[in-house]
Amino acid sequence: MTALTVLQVLLLVLLVMCGVLAVWLKDLLGSVIALAAGSLLLALQFYLLQAPDVAIAEAGIGAALTTALFVLAIRKTRRKEEE
Amino acid sequence: MSVVVRTVARLLLAPVAIFGAYVVMHGHLTPGGGFQGGAVIASAIALVVVAFGAQRLRKQKKTLSVLEDVGATAFAVLAFLGIGVTFFYNALAGTGGLFGQTVPIGPNPGALNTGGLLPLMNWAVGLKVLAGLGSMVLLLGLLGGDDDR
């Protein structure tokens, strides 16, 4: 395997870990941050797959704007998830 | 928000907005374009709303609405400019002057003054997207009470 393949597999494993963390965390703000980190990893993966256009869109929409919307929504409601 | 968030937001606001403008301006040469650059500039607006509270931008609601209308109208008008040949005809390409230069032959780093109507249309789309996404975040921030936690 080349170094690029190793890096891509590592990115995908980290992406799945971010997704699991977003579901598992009880603190919703931490959950949103995990989701944003996963979005950023996905943007890096898009860049490695020779799609820089999609990578910019993913970093702008997925990592920045969605996070802002979720943070604003959490600010309007509650931060902790109920049991 | 806390002092850390406010300070980092003050530091990052200008670079983010300038990078968005760069992506829009070089839309016909490099990856990205009107939509991507507009989304990056809108994320600068979202940074202000999250870090300093939406009340700071309450008066800009009308401005964003006008900007969105201007972007949509400019795109349609630019598309109609070449109606003598066909809809969406690039009437400005190859005529010389601003954005009308011909592309140099052979490998080159990309000439900014080419593309005809495409850079202008990129600006129109970028304006529309930044106003649309920005007002979306701003309206969600203005919703309900003024609780800046």
Image: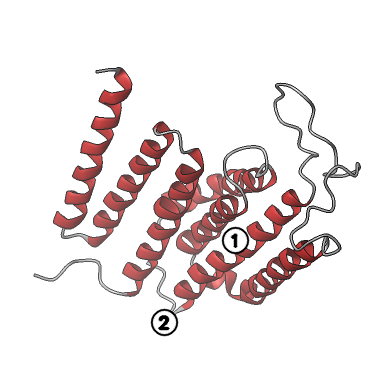
Mark nearest the camera among 1 and 2 is 1
Residue B27 seen in render: yes
Specify few, some or many for label 2: CA neighbours under 10 Å numbering under 14, 14-19, or 20 or more. Answer: few
Place residue A14 in its image quadrant: top left
Q: Is residue A64 left or right of residue A21?
A: right
Q: Kindly identify the amino acid type of the residue bearing the numbered disc 2.
A: Gly
Q: Residue B147, image x and y in percent?
A: 40, 74
Sequence-wise, the earlier of marks 1 and 2 is: 1
Residue B1 seen anywhere in this rendered image of the structure: no
Q: Name the residue under label 2.
A: B144
Name above or below for residue B104 compared with residue A25: above
Residue sitting at the far bottom: B144
Mark 1 and mark 2, same subunit? yes
Q: Which colour scheme is used?
A: secondary structure
Circle 1 sits in a helix, a strand or a loop, which is it? helix
Task: Tell me which residue sits at (53%, 59%) in the image.
Answer: B48
Q: How far apart are marks 1 and 2 (CA)?
A: 24 Å
**Which of these two is toward me, A13 or A26?**
A13
Residue at the left extreme?
A83
Q: In this view, does A31 lie to the left or right of A4?
A: left
Q: On residue B130, which mark appears?
A: 1
The location of residue A43, given as percent across then percent down, is: 40, 42
Q: Residue at x 55, y 60 (%)?
A: B45
Q: Which amino acid does label 1 sit on?
A: Leu
Residue B30 point in image, percent of width and height: 62, 37
Q: Nearer the viewer, residue B9 or A8?
A: A8
